[in-house]
């Protein structure tokens, strides 16, 4: 009997143990992720392994956890074709450090609850369809170093609370519908035009655009350092009230007088401007000589000054020459500087096509694309007006500058690769109609004062070489960068741009031109050289010897991405969105703030 009781007790313990294992509950963070998943439409079933039968979510797609307490620290789901909204449950993940949901089709608003993720360091929500404004509560995320909300449908004012983000190193709010004055407060004062480009109704110091009243007068708006309105202190003294009423009455009378004077002045100026416009119009019509078009008010100068400066450009102002014409530096009276590209007469096509296509190119705004501000048609030439980027082209840095002038560090090269990929991916995937560049090369990657890359000359190959809107029959581009199928058929596609970008990556790694003599001697170009290295190589034989801070891990990652971009079959190449995702995974992992807080751009 005793033996039977012992067997029964043993079986009971075993059953309880097994029951405990089988019913082991999913962690709270796992439950939260399932709540977030419930508001998403996973069209490609990428999140199929997010199951409530697991003990933790740490092995789920795109999820990373802290090794000790298994709390979720990262959600990395870019380019997953996810639809739906960002759930307010995100705020329950209070140990979350990185949230990457860019390149999807999310809509709805950014939830205020995201501010409860108090350890958040990087927030990537770009290239979605998010609406509404930026929650002011984001300003409470004291650890935030990266904030990218670009290419959405966001609108409203930029909250001044973002100025409290003292650790912010990267800010991109471009290509949205924000309006009003950009607060010149705290961290927001450290970012310039590139962080806000493509928001046509923004004004302020950062975008070099003065804010104006409804009457058109410049106005200095109060800083948004505090969102609270000042409340006057109550006075109990009747004498003080009387003085206050008297002062206000006097100010009211003065304001009415001033307003009357300004209105008379405004009407007078308007009449003068109308008369001047009529005179200029008659002059232009009589000469039938010059047409000046600026896009979205991007060139805030009188037409007469712009035309005068353009007509006075000569050989002393030349700063470069490319496949489409000569580039000049144009300096305005207030020292504002622009680049003017004079199109060769032999490259001109239909005037109507030229102007129609330029309207499209002028509407494209992105932080990593050179801004086309306008164009001018003179009797003898056509000219395009761009932003002037003081540091010239990547080609200059890699091949023209001597060692004594410094060379690009490895971290700077990675930043250039990443930014160039973002600009090209925007042309391929976010523009309507989509744009194939056709001439990706180091000479068409320009660098600003912060060594941020800006892709230039996009759309010009199609505009100036072929008047057919759909098919390219003439090869445009630079030898050494051209994909084999493009050379054979003359037909440009997004995949031929991907090939050229792969060559650009190899150029960044090696510091050599695609057709460097050391490759030619072996009967190869830079792509053939890469293929010859598949059997192994030494780091010192591959990386530009002038760059001493490269590490083997990221070099190998970039070479692998370049190899995928330059495979012979275009169908086997990744899209630019996929290339961008690969670069972000390698360059910005494990912590994006490490990349943006990297050392100097120069070795």
Image (cartoon, rainbow, N blue to C red):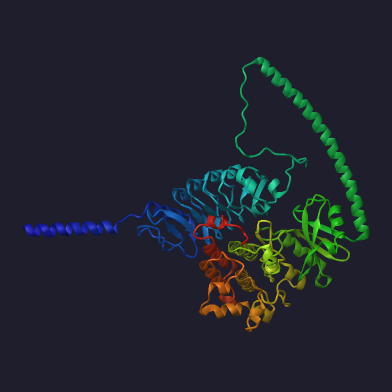
512 w.r.t. 111: above or below = below
Q: Nearer the viewer, residue 24 or 299?
A: 299
**Residue 504, visible in the rendered structure:** yes
Locate residue 312, reporting x and y percent. 87, 59
Q: Residue furthest left?
A: 1
Which quarter of the figure is the C terminus placed in?
bottom right
The quadrant holding residue 151 is bottom right
Tell me if I can see residue 568 in this picture: no
The residue at the point 85 percent across, 36 percent down is 264
Look at 72% across and 66% down and name the residue there.
457
User: Residue placed farthest to the front in the image?
Assistant: 404
Q: Position of residue 14 (x, y in %)?
A: 20, 59
Residue 217 position within the rendered picture, expressed as x and y whole percent measured from the top left:
78, 40
**Position of residue 224 in the picture relative to residue 35 (left or right):** right
| Numbered disc total | 0
In the rendered image, residue 576, in percent from the top left (x then y), is placed at 59, 67
Q: Residue at x 62, y 19 (%)?
A: 235
User: Where is residue 237, by image quadrant?
Assistant: top right
Q: Residue at x 70, y 72 (%)?
A: 470
Q: Which residue appears farthest toward the right when viewing the image?
A: 286
* Quadrant that contains the N terminus: bottom left
Identify which residue, 548 or 214, lies in the foreground.
548
Figure check: 409 above or below 198: below
Determine whether, in the image, residue 515 is placed left or right of residue 267: left
């Amino acid at each position: 009997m005793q033996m039977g009781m012992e067997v029964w007790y043993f079986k009971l313990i075993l059953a309880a143990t097994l029951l405990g294992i089988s019913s082991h509950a999913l962690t709270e963070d796992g439950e939260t992720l399932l709540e977030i998943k419930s508001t998403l439409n996973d069209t490609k079933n990428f999140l199929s392994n997010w199951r409530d039968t697991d003990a933790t979510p740490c092995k789920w797609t795109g999820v990373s956890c802290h090794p000790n307490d298994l709390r979720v620290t990262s959600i990395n789901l870019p380019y997953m074709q996810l639809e739906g909204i960002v759930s307010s449950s995100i705020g329950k993940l209070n140990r979350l450090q990185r949230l990457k949901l860019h390149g999807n089709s999310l809509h709805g608003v950014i939830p205020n609850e995201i501010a409860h993720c108090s350890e958040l360091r990087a927030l990537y929500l770009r290239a979605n369809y998010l609406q509404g404004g930026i929650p002011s509560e984001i300003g409470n995320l004291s650890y935030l170093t990266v904030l990218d909300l670009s290419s959405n449908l966001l609108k409203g004012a930029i909250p001044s609370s973002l100025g409290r983000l003292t650790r912010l190193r990267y800010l991109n709010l471009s290509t949205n519908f924000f309006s009003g004055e950009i607060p010149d407060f705290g961290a927001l004062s450290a970012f310039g035009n590139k962080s806000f480009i493509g928001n046509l109704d923004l004004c302020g110091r950062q975008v070099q655009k003065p804010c104006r009243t409804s009457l058109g007068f410049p106005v200095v708006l109060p800083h948004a350092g505090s969102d609270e309105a000042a409340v006057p202190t109550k006075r109990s003294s009747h004498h003080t009230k009387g003085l206050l009423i008297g002062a206000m009455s006097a100010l009211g009378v003065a304001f009415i007088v001033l307003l009357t004077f300004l209105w008379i002045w405004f009407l007078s100026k308007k009449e003068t401007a109308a008369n001047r416009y009529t005179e200029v119009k008659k002059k232009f019509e009589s000469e039938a000589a010059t047409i000046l078009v600026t896009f979205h008010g991007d060139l805030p100068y009188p037409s007469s000054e712009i035309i005068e400066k353009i007509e006075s450009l000569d050989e002393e102002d030349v700063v470069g020459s490319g496949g489409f014409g000569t580039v000049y530096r144009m300096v305005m009276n207030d020292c504002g500087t622009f680049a003017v590209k004079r199109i060769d007469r032999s490259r001109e096509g239909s005037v109507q096509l030229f102007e129609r296509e330029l309207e499209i190119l002028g509407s494209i705004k992105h932080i990593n694309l050179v801004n086309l501000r306008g164009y001018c048609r003179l009797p003898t030439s056509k000219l395009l007006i761009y932003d002037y980027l003081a540091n010239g082209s990547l080609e200059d840095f890699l091949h023209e500058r001597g060692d004594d002038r410094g060379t690009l560090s490895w971290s700077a090269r990675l930043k250039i690769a990443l930014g160039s990929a973002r600009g090209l991916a925007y042309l391929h995937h976010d523009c309507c109609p989509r744009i194939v560049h056709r001439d990706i090369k180091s000479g068409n990657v320009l660098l600003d004062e912060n060594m941020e890359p800006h892709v230039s000359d996009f759309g010009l190959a199609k505009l100036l070489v072929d008047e057919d809107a759909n098919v390219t029959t003439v090869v445009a581009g630079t030898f050494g960068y051209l994909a084999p199928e493009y050379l054979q058929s003359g037909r440009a596609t997004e995949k031929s741009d991907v090939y050229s970008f792969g060559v650009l990556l190899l150029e960044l790694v090696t510091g050599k031109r695609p057709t460097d003599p050391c490759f030619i001697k072996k009967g190869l170009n830079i792509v053939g050289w890469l293929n010859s290295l598949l059997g192994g190589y030494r780091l010192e034989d591959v990386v530009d010897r002038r760059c001493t801070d490269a590490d083997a891990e990221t070099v190998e990652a970039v070479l692998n991405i370049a190899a995928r971009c330059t495979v012979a079959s275009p169908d086997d190449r990744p899209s630019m969105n996929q290339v961008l995702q690969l670069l972000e995974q390698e360059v910005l992992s494990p912590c994006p703030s490490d990349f943006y807080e990297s050392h100097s751009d120069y070795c």
